[in-house]
Structure formats: C-alpha cells, structure tokens
Image (cartoon, helix red, strand yellow):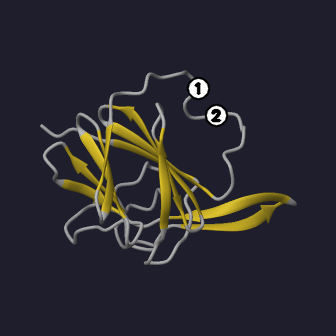
C-alpha cells in the first residue's frame, strides 16, 4: 500500500550549488535555516506532511489562505552532522544538504521519494500592476519511467505531462 505524501512549497528562492548555511533555529512549529540569500522554514504539518517556505525578508503578516485552521504540530526531531540537517517525523523526513542547499525527502525507512534538482529554486523579484511580487520556479529529479499527471486543466489529450511543454 502506498502512502501519498503532501508537501507544500511556498515562496522558493534561487541560490547557487554552493550554499552557506549560516545557522538554524528550532521552534515548536519547525525550524528556520538561515542561508546565503534568505531563510528556509521547514514546518511539520502532520506525521506524513512537511510544509516548506523560503523567504528573503522576514515573514510578513499576509493572511494565510491555505491553512486557515490552527493545527497541532506533530512531534519531530532535528539532527545535524557535518553534511546535513535532517528533520524527522513519524513517516517522513526532510534532509537539507549543507553543501548544495538541496532538499531530499524520504519515508520512515529512509527511501527517497522526492529530491530537488540542485540550484533549481528560483525566486525573482518582479511587479504586477505596480505591486511587488516574485516569480517562483522549482524543479525536481525524476526517473525516466515516472509519469507526471496534471489536474485536468489541459484538454489536449496528453495525460502524462512529462516532457510536454
């Protein structure tokens, strides 16, 4: 039986393949990792889900549109060694590689199920109608036999969207 893991990625930023991890702070809600060009927030949501936020400036007080109810943070542990910072929950782990800034996600057995492409996070300052915003982009490693399915928004007959542009 497969367990589907939910990962929520918001406000992602670009950085090079060599990232400087300056420090991290653990709170009851998660951890904040200060890197060269911002802060990476890793928030356990449930035993099966982790929310990721990357921001260049302090988190502002925008109205939360995704998590509108207060949720109880599940138990989690943080481990650090010379090459990684790892956040462990009951069924899912997030591992930040210190040298590259790459995030890797594993199940409780340590099997990788999602991995970022190094240097693929982009957060580019822009404006829309004179209002400041960011263009966000992120890429993940994918095996050649992995299918990527959309949400039905494209009615062009392509069900597997891998390598379709």
Rendering coords of residue 73 (x, y %): 42, 27
Label 1 environment density (alpha carbons within 10 Å; few <14, some 14–19, many ≥20) = few
- Choose between 131 and 158: the one closer to the eye: 131
Residue pushed farthest right? 130
Say if mark 2 contacts mark 1, CB within 8 Å: yes
Task: State left or right for residue 58 relative to residue 44.
Answer: right
Residue furthest bottom as drawn: 17
Spatial CA span between label 2 and label 1: 6 Å
Instruction: Judge by depth and name the residue closer to the eye, 136 or 111.
Output: 111
In which image quadrant can residue 113 be found?
A: bottom left
Judge the density around disc 2: few (<14), some (14-19), many (≥20) Cα neighbours within 10 Å: few
Q: Could you tell me which quadrant the N terminus lies in?
A: top left
Q: Find residue 141 and name its label.
A: none
Q: Which quadrant of the structure image shows residue 30? A: top left
Residue 139: image location, x then y, percent: 42, 67
Q: Is residue 11 above or below residue 145?
A: above
Location of mark 1 (residue): 68
């Amino acid at each position: 039986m497969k367990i589907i893991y939910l990962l929520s990625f918001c406000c992602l930023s670009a950085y090079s393949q060599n990232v400087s991890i300056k420090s991290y702070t653990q709170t009851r809600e998660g951890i904040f990792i200060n890197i060269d060009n911002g802060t990476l927030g890793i928030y356990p949501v449930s035993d099966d889900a982790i929310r990721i936020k990357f921001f260049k400036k302090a988190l502002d007080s925008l109205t939360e549109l995704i998590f509108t109810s207060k949720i109880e943070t599940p138990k989690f542990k943080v481990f650090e060694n010379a090459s990684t910072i790892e956040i462990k929950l009951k069924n899912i782990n997030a591992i930040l590689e210190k040298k590259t800034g790459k995030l890797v996600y594993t199940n409780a057995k340590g099997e990788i199920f999602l991995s970022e492409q190094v240097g693929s996070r982009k957060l580019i300052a822009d404006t829309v109608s004179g209002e400041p915003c960011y263009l966000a982009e992120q890429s993940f490693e994918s095996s050649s036999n992995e299918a990527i399915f959309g949400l039905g928004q494209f009615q062009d007959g392509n069900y597997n969207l891998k390598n379709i542009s």
